[in-house]
Image: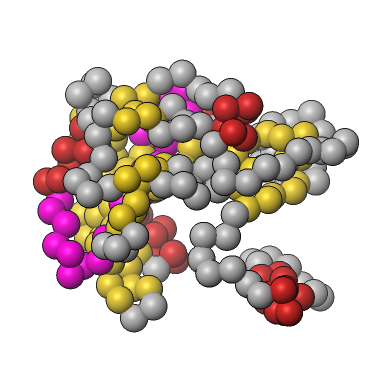
Amino acid sequence: AQHVPGTTVTLVPLEGMEPAQDFSGFGNAQAQASILVAELPAEARAQLVPLFEDLNVAKGAFVTQGVIVETLDTVTTDAGVEAALVRGTQSMGGDTYDKWIALLHGDRTVMITVQAPEAAGLAAEAVDAMIRSVALGDAATVESKLEALPFDVSAVEPFRVVDTIAGSGVLMTAGELDVDPEGSQPMLIVAFQISEPVSVSMQEQAAELLLSQTEGLSDI
């Protein structure tokens, strides 16, 4: 069993997976396979649970992300925690990937996403066994989460660090609320780009493209 730095999660990773350096989880670059651990505040549970309670609801929710859900099951960890587990496929860059998304609850709301090329034939039984090995500990401190990031960043007033995002980003806000569903406070996100870096000469165009793709914005 290996602890995922900056998270509450300890698990036995799939064979061939090594601790990732630029996100929370494990990866096998040669096989193009990964295990991503993302933690959200406990308050997020109420919003996410309905997506994992009904197969048809799960299909409708995840198809917007390009995931074609095929099954919805419940796996009980060796520690007695129930995990909802959806399985499906996702097409990216001309390739099809098998995908699993598990939802668990402890001090934090935990999502574990596993993906591997369909051609690799990753067995569902292996993923089930990995989910059963999950143990959830106490919530990590903000300091330990920042140390686990692949970059260094410090908040400057009036901003303060609220949380990190899947070990590759940090969320800051200005205001008293840590959880702000109404969007009443300013928010600043700094994220590490896992894909190929953008050249210096293309930074402005890349920024404009990202902004234009942000849902809900107008008059950009």
Query: Front-most of 210 and 198?
Result: 198
Say whether residue 57 is left or right of residue 73: right
Estimate the x, y position of residue 41 in percent, counting from the top left.
Answer: 55, 32
Estimate the x, y position of residue 208 in percent, counting from the top left.
Answer: 73, 75
The stretch in magenta equals 104-124
Please tell me which residue is depicted at 41% across the width and 58% down the height of the picture.
61
Q: How is the image coloured?
A: secondary structure
Q: Is residue 118 visible?
A: yes
Please tell me which residue is depicted at 37% across the width and 29% down the height of the picture.
3
Query: Front-most of 130 and 56?
Result: 130
Estimate the x, y position of residue 52 in percent, counting from the top left.
Answer: 34, 45
Please tell me which residue is depicted at 28% across the width and 72% down the height of the picture.
96
- The answer to whether residue 126 is magenta is no
Please tell me which residue is depicted at 13% across the width and 53% down the height of the picture.
123
- The answer to whether residue 119 is magenta is yes
Q: Is residue 177 above or below residue 196?
A: above
Q: Is residue 102 above or below residue 30?
A: above
Q: Which quarter of the picture shows residue 146? A: top right
